[in-house]
Amino acid sequence: MNLHTPPTGSINDAVKELAETFELLGDWEERYRHVIDLGRHLGRLGEDERSEENRVRGCASQVWLVTGRAEDGRLWFQGDSDAHIVRGLIAILLGFYNGRTPAEIMAFDAKLALARLGLPKALSRQRANGLAAMVERIRADAASPL
């Protein structure tokens, strides 16, 4: 897993920045394009990482999430999906969670933040459920000693 420098701002700063970008984009057609573009910048997982163990259950699309823990305890995630919009949703979550401590992850109210962005209302029920499943998987990994 390629570890990066820890983020400089808080998770809420990352949410605020994305919310401001969404405001500038205006309608959901533009926002969807932006989300898909974010997903294009995700690295692809290798075939060995696209395993049943890494699969996120509860998603309509195929979603895989790999979690690593740095020596300082910070968590780093990589994700992939077979659907463009879902790859973008993974990119959003990784933007919030990568480089955070388990305590930061557990303290973050993802449901409130995603509602602020308007994502649960803008997504199909299946996609919104899948997004919630990804958040729960990240929280579960943060709560467990990898």
Image: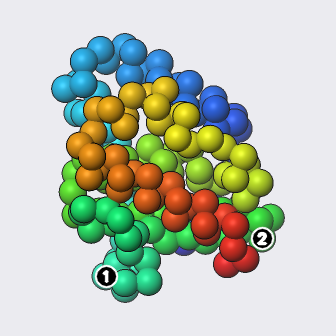
Secondary structure under badge 1?
loop
| Badge 1 amino acid | Glu
| Residue 30 position by quadrant | top left
- Chain-order first, disc 2 or disc 1: 1
Between 133 and 66, the one lying in front of the other is: 133
Location of mark 1 (residue) = 47
* Residue at x 21% of width, y 57% of height: 83
Residue plotted at (24% across, 62% down): 60
Q: Is residue 64 visible?
A: no
In the rendered image, the quadrant that contains the N terminus is: bottom right
Alpha carbon distance from label 2 to label 1: 26 Å
Above or below 10: residue 133: below
Depth check: give the residue in front, 117 or 17. Answer: 117
| Residue projecting furthest to the right | 72
- Can you say whether 49 is above or below 6 in the image? below
Q: Residue 9's x, y, as percent?
A: 69, 34
* Image location (x, y in percent) of residue 134: 45, 58
Q: Residue at x 69, y 36 (%)?
A: 10
